[in-house]
Image: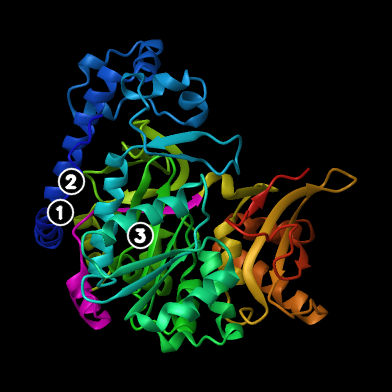
Amino acid sequence: MKSFGFYKPNSFLNQEFHDLKTKPASFWEKKGEKMVMDLFRYVYATVPAYKKFLKKRKIDGSKIKTLADFKKLPLIDKAGYLRPSIYEELFANRDLTSATTVSATSGSTGEPFYFPRAEAQDEQYRYVAEIFSKNQFDIDKHSTLGIVGFGLGIWIGGMFTYKNFNAIAQKGFKLTLAPVGTDKELFLKTLKQFGHDYDQVILMGYPPFIKDVIDHAAEYGINLKDYKIRILTAAEGFSERCREYMAREAGLANPYRDIVNIYGTVELGTMAHETALCYLIRHLAHTNKALAQSLFPNASTVPTLAQYYPQIVHFEQMKGEVIGTGYGSLIPLLRYRFHDVGGVIKFDDMAARLAALGVDLNKELTKSGIKDLVLKLPFVYVVERSDHTIILRGANIYASQIRNALDDHALSKFVTGKFTMIKKENWKSDEFLEIHVELKKRVKPTAVLKKKVLITIVADLRKCNSEYSDAYAHQSRQVTPRLKFWPYQHHQHFGAGKQRWVKNSK
């Protein structure tokens, strides 16, 4: 299969690492444009399903010569392209036998769909992971224990992380991996057994799981502040409040550089990651409403903000959604719609917007101790998955908004931050929002606590969601959520693995 040259020997990667900080942003953007056109020509020539897709729409692929032409091509998605196609015809030359691993979607929004990957796709992540691990986690300078708390099995998180970090370790880094999966007890026992033998420990897992690990470390006789902790998360974003909470409780030396959150999908693998610069910008936006509105006009809370490598994945913003192009599995995807609400900002545009609002970026970088970490890569931001939204009486309520409310410092002693929201109807067919909230261990749902949580959720929604605020002004009773509180890790809504933030009513 065509690899598009992502294999990076040490000497090349060291040069690339230097170039990412010194070459102008336009250099990387041009590399991205070249990748897009190369990939389009390859897909049009070798992927039968895509050729049929264009032919059905009376599009002659041979006439697509420029990036402007490419941006006129129709979008594809799972429902309109992947599922209707003959499966083997989604692959270049109908060949999937070069695959070394098969991953699947979680099935949370439908039946699982399978994405085989070859070494060329894994090498893309190795390239990205080695860069952020050296840049922010200093794995080339410290012995490191990485405890992998992503789900193991056919879902991409755990196996993808273990396989590729293991390959990085084999390049000579002092990096040991413990792939324990989503077993919190085993995760913490592993940390206690081996953590002190290493200069640093990277806690790897879904954000709610890592927060859970941090919350319960003391029960296992672990003081996280006795270790040099770094955090690697993926699969979903988290609020600025949650980041500050994890940084404080885990005793992170520098909360900007010690956390990396990955924006990825099973379709295209690791597409981008939050950097120290991203966290600085998020923090500034969190405390400056004008800045937040300028940078993220379609967001009601500060979104996931990540930087991406254009030579691997190309992003576009279209009608308030993020569109991606890349070869992250053996099924190449052109102008793929993830149904993620968000946008794209070029590196130089980001700097200009910050300056226009009076932000001295150099001063802020120096003050935060991260000036040497800046990569001159474009940004992609994700507000929310469109299927993480409930429409209640005309108001779009996003899971991220409820997460932000439950991450409030005043509630953090009582609730884990996990919840599931469901839109239901009563016997008169009137709709209402039901939110199931997970309590921390040994916490009882007292009347005072219930009232406190409800007031916080409603107040946060009214503050950050203008649609909800308007609905509340006219029909407060109907749009006030009904809360149900559950014991810690109750199987009904809070089992192991990825949290289901939104469920359909049955």
* Mark 1 vs mark 3: in front: 1
Q: Is residue 295 magenta?
A: no
Residue placed under numbered mark 2 in the picture = 29
The three-letter code of the residue at mark 3 reads Ser
The three-letter code of the residue at mark 2 reads Glu
* Mark 3 vs mark 2: in front: 2
Image x and y of residue 99, in percent: 36, 34
| Disc 1 from disc 3: Cα separation | 21 Å
Number of the label disc, if any, that sits on residue 294: 3
At x 59% / y 72%, what residue is drawn?
Answer: 185
Q: Is residue 377 magenta?
A: yes
- Please tell me how crowded label 1 is: few (under 14), some (14-19), or many (20+) other residues with Cα within 10 Å: some
- Tell me the magenta residue range: 360-384
Number of the label disc, if any, that sits on residue 445: none
Q: Is residue 64 visible?
A: yes
Number of the label disc, if any, that sits on residue 25: 1
Counting residues from the start of the chain, the first of labels 1 and 3 encountered is 1
Vertical arrangement, residue 384 with respect to residue 332, above or below: below
Q: Is residue 459 visible?
A: no
The three-letter code of the residue at mark 1 reads Ala
Which residue occupies the foreground of this view, 5 or 240? 5
Q: Is residue 293 left or right of residue 389?
A: left
Q: Is residue 15 left or right of residue 465?
A: left
| Disc 3 from disc 2: Cα separation | 23 Å
At x 60% / y 40%, what residue is drawn?
Answer: 109
Q: Secondary structure at mark 1?
A: helix
**Do tag 3 and tag 2 residues touch (Cβ < 8 Å)?**
no
**Do tag 1 and tag 2 residues touch (Cβ < 8 Å)?**
yes
Counting residues from the start of the chain, the first of labels 3 and 2 encountered is 2
Q: Secondary structure at mark 2?
A: helix
At x 75% / y 45%, what residue is drawn?
Answer: 505
